[in-house]
Image: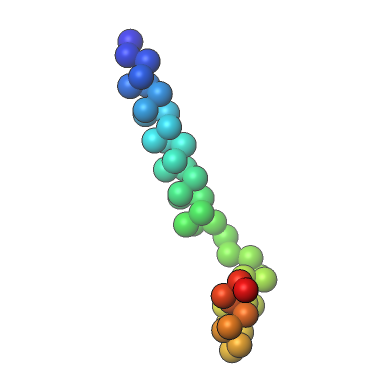
Amino acid sequence: MNYIFIMEIFILVILVLIVGFILFRPISKKELDRYNDKDNWSNMGF
């Protein structure tokens, strides 16, 4: 068994799971309110 290959696959799977969670997580009510707010300067995070 090639352990480096197994580690690469393991790290790739974890990265895909993290990116998938960030992209497809449920959007909270607070984020929706901030997105729909007409004062969009408050979205900039300053």
Q: Is residue 13 left or right of residue 30?
A: left
In-front residue for pair 43/33 = 43
Q: Residue furthest bottom?
A: 38
Q: In this view, does 10 lie to the left or right of 35?
A: left
Residue appearing at x 33%, y 21% in the figure: 5
Residue appearing at x 39%, y 35% in the figure: 12
Q: Residue furthest top?
A: 1
Decide: is 13 above or below 44.
above
User: Visible in this render: residue 16?
Assistant: yes
Residue appearing at x 62%, y 74% in the figure: 46
Total labels drawn: 0
Toward which corner of the image does residue 10 lie, by quadrant? top left
Decide: is 17 above or below 31.
above
Q: Residue furthest front?
A: 46
Toward which corner of the image does residue 27 lie, by quadrant? bottom right
| Colour scheme | rainbow
Could you tell me residue 22's position as x and y percent?
51, 54
Could you tell me residue 14's position as x and y percent?
46, 37
Decide: is 35 above or below 15.
below
Q: In which quarter of the image is the N terminus?
A: top left
Residue appearing at x 42%, y 35% in the figure: 13
Q: Residue furthest right?
A: 30
Could you tell me residue 30's position as x and y percent?
67, 71
In-front residue for pair 42/20 = 42
Decide: is 32 above or below 25.
below
User: Visible in this render: residue 32?
Assistant: no
